[in-house]
Image (spheres, rainbow, N blue to C red):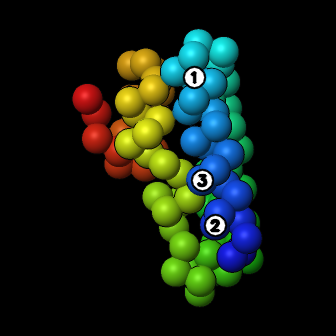
């Protein structure tokens, strides 16, 4: 979990840069986010380990960075799923 807490945010920062450069769409980033969210919230073992380590989804995903890089679709998704601000 410790290593993932560094890798996952870096991965989403890269996706945010690609999104800002228009190499990715909001939908492609949302697909990646959904995969992470579903795997972290549906698997009780993963959820328990994250909790024990003091790691939450909001710590793993650079929400504000993705909001600023994405369009309305991504902004709405982040706001509804993770409570990110909706600019």
On the rendered structure, is 21 left or right of 75? Answer: right
The residues tagged by marks 2 and 1 sit, at their Cα atoms, a distance apart of: 22 Å
Task: Evaluate if marks 3 and 1 touch, with contact meaning CB atoms under 8 Å apart.
Answer: no
The number of numbered discs placed on residues in the rendered structure image is 3
The residues tagged by marks 3 and 1 sit, at their Cα atoms, a distance apart of: 15 Å
Q: Residue 9 carries which label?
A: 3
Task: Evaluate if marks 2 and 3 touch, with contact meaning CB atoms under 8 Å apart.
Answer: yes
Residue drawn where x is 52% and y is 21% of the image? 20
In the rendered image, which quarter is residue 87 located in? Answer: top left
Crowdedness near tag 3: few (<14), some (14–19) or many (≥20) residues, C-alpha within 10 Å: some
Task: Evaluate if marks 2 and 1 touch, with contact meaning CB atoms under 8 Å apart.
Answer: no
On the rendered structure, is 17 left or right of 35? Answer: left
The image shows residue 6 at horizontal and vertical percentages of 65, 63
Q: In which quarter of the image is the N terminus?
A: bottom right
* Residue at mark 1: 19
Query: Which is more N-terminal, label 1 or label 2?
Result: 2
Q: Residue 5 carries which label?
A: 2
């Amino acid at each position: 979990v410790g290593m993932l807490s560094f890798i996952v945010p870096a991965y989403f920062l890269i996706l945010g840069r690609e999104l800002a450069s228009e190499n990715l769409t909001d939908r492609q980033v949302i697909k990646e986010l959904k995969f992470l969210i579903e795997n972290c919230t549906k698997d009780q073992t993963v959820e328990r380990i994250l909790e024990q380590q003091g790691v939450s989804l909001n710590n793993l995903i650079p929400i504000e960075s993705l909001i600023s890089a994405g369009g309305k679709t991504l902004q709405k998704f982040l706001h509804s799923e993770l409570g990110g601000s909706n600019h």
